[in-house]
Image (cartoon, rainbow, N blue to C red):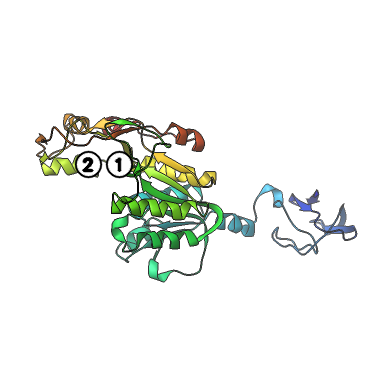
Amino acid sequence: MATAIAWPGGAFSCTRTSSLPIRRISSLSSAGVVKQSRFLRVSRIASSCGVLFRDVRCDATMAGKESPLEKSATMNNMNLLVVGPGVLGSLVGRRWLEQYEGCKVVGQTNTTNRHEELLSLGISPITKDMQSGDKYPYVIFCAPPSGSQDYVREVRAAAQRWDGEGSLLFTSSSGVYDVHNNGLCDENAPIIEKGKSPRLDMLLNAEEEVLKVGGNVVRLAGLYTRDRGAHTFWLQKGSVDARPDHYLNLIHYEDAADLCIAILKKKIREQVFMGCDNTPVTRQDIMDITLQSGKFKGGFRGFTKSEGPLGKKMNNNRTREMVEWQPQYHSFGDFINRN
């Protein structure tokens, strides 16, 4: 039972947590005159509101504002560990700090090469061999398989750093979906059978490690920025030995970061999400948009294959509804036109 108590300069509430006798608490006004406060039941010493009351637990804050201790506790509850703070992980960390000022974001790397850069972003860097026993309410694993000799073990180790309170998220790839021939693909589409691709096997095994402890997975489509992605690679390559009519699915890095944060904040358990802009494009579409924009230079000459496997057309409406997220850039063309 919560009881509101008047106090010079503000008010706070206290909660009955024991059946000890009712006591009357007296307080001094600013003029030094003793005033009688309300009756309340008492339990234990609490000092988080800045005034010591014996056997009283403060559940609200002085004058409607958080005390420093309470604010610190709140921010600690929003601390985030980013395993693999590369382009995507760094964006997640920066945006998290913008939304939860005063919390701590830790970026775990394999080496110290980018530690100064991470510090400049407000992210506290550590290497994986510097790990302490600290646990975090929010953990996101963004590191690719290419940077690890035992990827699944490292994902398992990251999951063990989660305290089970906020959310654990693993960023996987939409490549695990077993959909071809430019077919439709949503969150419930079948996945590739294990044994066909060592890389995809690693991703699927890593997903299982996260899901079994209550974490979530987001399978991301092709990530890009203005100067990073398939379009820049093909510009440099010139002739590309691939089919031009193969459909690809994309999501801008910033939208992917915002999606990851939306999933983390929902505190959903054991779900698989999909990250894409819902506007599938062919390889030829991507290069037409790139070249016609007049914003890029390169020696792209074309795609040379007319046979071979085709892609898929992804739709993540279920994800958007579950986490209340929409991309800033609704297509690759939308991004290029606006930037």
- Mark 2 touches mark 1? (CB < 8 Å): yes
Total numbered circles: 2
Q: Going by the image, does 39 lie left or right of 241?
A: right
Q: Is residue 33 visible?
A: no
Disc 2 marks which amino acid?
Ala
Q: Look at the image and tell me in which quarter the C terminus lies.
A: top left
Which residue is pictured at 45% across the width and 55% down the height? Answer: 209
Q: Secondary structure at mark 1?
A: strand
Q: Going by the image, does 117 lie left or right of 98?
A: left
Q: Is residue 181 visible?
A: yes
Q: Nearer the viewer, residue 29 or 14?
A: 14
Q: Nearer the viewer, residue 324 or 242?
A: 242
Which residue is pictured at 51% across the width and 36% down the height? Answer: 322
Give the percent coordinates (x, y) of residue 38: 86, 51
How packed mark 2 is, by other alpha carbons closer than 10 Å (few <14, some 14-19, many 20 or more), is some
Give the percent coordinates (x, y) of residue 5: 80, 50
Which residue is pictured at 43% across the width and 36% down the height? Answer: 188
Give the percent coordinates (x, y) of residue 249: 30, 36
Q: Nearer the viewer, residue 241 or 276?
A: 241
The mark found on residue 86 in the picture is none
Q: Going by the image, does 46 lie left or right of 213?
A: right
Disc 1 marks which amino acid?
Gly
Give the percent coordinates (x, y) of residue 220: 36, 43
Q: Going by the image, does 64 lie left or right of 28?
A: left
Residue named by callout 2: 230
Residue 5 position (above or below residue 286): below
Where is residue 251, by image quadrant?
top left
Point out the tag, 2 or 1, that comes first from the N-terminus.
1
Which residue is pictured at 51% across the width and 66% down the height? Answer: 134
How packed mark 1 is, by other alpha carbons closer than 10 Å (few <14, some 14-19, many 20 or more), is some
Residue named by callout 1: 222
Real-space Cα separation, disc 2 to disc 1, in angstroms: 8 Å
